[in-house]
Amino acid sequence: MPNEKGWLTKDEAVATGLPLFIKTNSTLPGRWTDEPYGHAVLLTRTRCAQLKMPTLRSGREAVVAYRYAQAAASSFRYVPLYDRTSVFESGELPYSILQDGEIMGSSS
């Protein structure tokens, strides 16, 4: 059962079968546990809002992956990610603004 932010525990995140982005060391790049999407831009709800493309709060927007948040203060450390690939493919926003873990696969 997700917490009030929609975050999951490790067991819950693994049970979804969705890809997980794991980064346990700030100096090393993270990795995806699985890459079912050949190319995808996957952002947290906060990052979507920062880039002016908020997620639907009604729950009608599907989570497509989870990102491990090492600094989280509880066992709920897996943050939902949402697909924003089309915004970058259309050129509305440049790929250069993406951070580690926000892109899966190739960027072209």
Image (cartoon, rainbow, N blue to C red):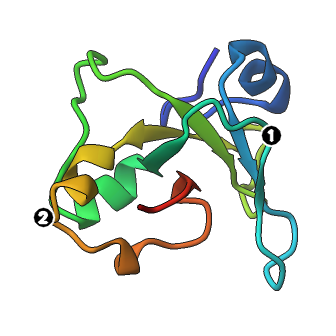
Q: Does residue 40 lie above or below 46 as drawn?
A: above
Residue at 79%, 79% in the rendered image: 26
Q: Amino acid at mark 1?
A: Thr
Where in the figure is residue 48, as x and y percent of width and height? 30, 54
Q: Quadrant of residue 30?
A: bottom right
- Looking at the rendered structure, the secondary structure element under dot 2 is loop
Disc on res. 69: none
Along the viewing direction, whichever of 6 and 65 lies nearer the viewer: 65
Work out whether 90 lies above or below 95: above
Picture quarter with the N terminus: top right
Task: Rate crowding at label 2 as few (under 14), some (14 to 19) or many (20 or more) other CA atoms within 10 Å.
Answer: few
Q: Nearer the viewer, residue 11 or 23?
A: 23
Q: Would you identify the image quadrant in which residue 96 lies?
A: bottom left
Q: Is residue 10 left or right of residue 20?
A: right
Tell me: 29 left or right of 105: right
Q: Which mark is residue 92?
A: 2
**Mark 1 residue element:** loop
Residue annotated with mark 1: 33
Which quadrant is the C terminus positioned in?
A: bottom left
Q: x and y percent of residue 41 in the render? A: 42, 51
Give the residue drawn at x 30%, y 23%: 61
23 w.r.t. 86: above or below = below
The answer to which image quadrant residue 69 occupies is: bottom right
Residue at point 58%, 34% (across, down) = 65
Residue at figure coordinates x 26%, y 15% from the top left: 60
Q: Amino acid at mark 2?
A: Glu
Farthest residue, direction front: 108
CA gap, disc 2 to disc 1? 29 Å
Q: Judge left or right: residue 53 versus residue 75.
A: left
